[in-house]
Image: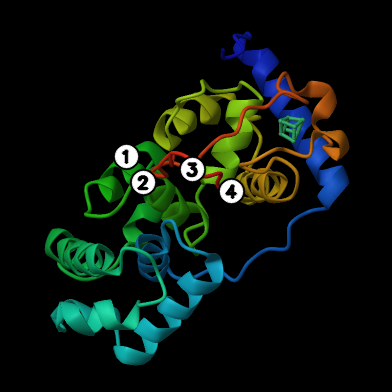
């Protein structure tokens, strides 16, 4: 069951979680920001893939194509071959080329800098009309890139923690979680604090709030967490339950 609290109470809770995670992990180191088109490319190829493999695929694309415009004009098989380390490389290669072509068709050239001046919600919606772009990729394009807009990236680690904290329901998707959480973030937060918040919750999901049995005993959020010591196993979206074999 999802906790139902007044909006101001949820904001206070989120601020408390954030403070506890900062105290435990320290402030995340800022990452090098890519230009927004490059960040869009990284997002489309990076779904359900280890970060190191996404980075290798991204660097391979940059080595294979002289520019993102050249990728639009190149054969899709060459895109697929370059991004081999990622999952679903055939679908991602098609989505990537079509998405970049659609940006070019809609804007007259391959650029996303105009989103710097748009309100965040319409900017997310504009990006999500592109093939292969869901809320995680659209938010990352706005927040991680040099656009540095206040959009919250929620990945599967972050979503799992939100579900166990019962800030969102057990079946909430990333987009539903986004729509519930963002209005409840402290109003004074800037884009860097949105980024920090995502990094901190992701780190908690990677280090304590695992998809299998969470390590609640040492978790800095334990005093605030209604699932502490009793969190159900949360399978990542798209994974299948197998009969007769325990998952490792
Ligand atoms: S107390 Fe346990 S279930 Fe709750 S956030 Fe921490 S690790 Fe996850």
x 18%, y 76%: residue: 72
Give the mark, 2 or 3, whose residue is nearer the N terminus: 2
Q: Would you name the residue on which mark 2 appears?
A: 118
Q: Would you name the residue on which mark 3 appears?
A: 236
Q: CA distance from mark 2 to mark 1?
A: 7 Å
Q: Would you name the residue on which mark 1 appears?
A: 122
Q: Position of residue 137 (x, y in %)?
A: 40, 53
Give the mark, 1 or 4, whose residue is nearer the N terminus: 1
Which one is in front, 115 or 237?
237
x 42%, y 28%: residue: 176
Q: Would you name the residue on which mark 4 appears?
A: 191
Q: Single out the mark in the foreground, 3 or 1.
A: 3
Image height of 129 relative to 181, above or below = below
Q: Residues within 10 Å of mark 1 (few under 14, many from 20)?
A: few
Q: Position of residue 13 (x, y in %)?
A: 73, 22
Image height of 103 relative to 197, above or below = below
Is residue 154 visible to the viewer in this orientation of the structure? no
Q: Position of residue 79 (x, y in %)?
A: 25, 79
Q: Label 2's element?
A: loop
């Amino acid at each position: 069951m999802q906790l139902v609290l007044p909006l101001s109470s949820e904001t206070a809770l989120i601020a408390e979680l954030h403070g506890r995670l900062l105290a435990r992990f320290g402030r995340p180191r800022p990452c090098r920001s890519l230009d927004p088109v490059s960040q869009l490319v990284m997002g489309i190829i990076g779904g359900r893939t280890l970060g190191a493999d996404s980075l290798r695929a991204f660097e391979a694309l940059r080595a294979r194509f002289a520019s993102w415009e050249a990728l639009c004009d190149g054969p899709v098989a060459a895109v697929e071959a370059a991004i081999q380390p990622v999952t679903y490389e055939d679908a991602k290669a098609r989505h990537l080329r079509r998405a970049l072509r659609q940006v070019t068709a809609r804007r007259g050239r391959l650029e996303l800098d105009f989103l710097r001046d748009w309100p965040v919600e319409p900017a997310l919606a504009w990006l999500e009309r592109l093939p292969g772009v869901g809320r995680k990729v659209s938010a990352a394009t706005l927040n991680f890139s040099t656009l540095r807009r206040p959009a919250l990236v929620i990945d599967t680690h972050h979503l799992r923690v939100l579900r166990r904290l019962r800030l969102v329901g057990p079946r909430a998707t990333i987009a539903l979680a986004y729509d519930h959480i963002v209005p409840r973030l402290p109003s004074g937060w800037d884009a860097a604090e949105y980024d920090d918040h995502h990094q901190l919750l992701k780190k908690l999901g990677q280090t304590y709030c695992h998809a299998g049995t969470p390590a609640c005993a040492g978790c800095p959020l334990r005093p605030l967490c209604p699932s502490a010591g009793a969190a159900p196993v949360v399978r990542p979206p798209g994974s299948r339950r197998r009969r007769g074999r325990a998952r490792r």
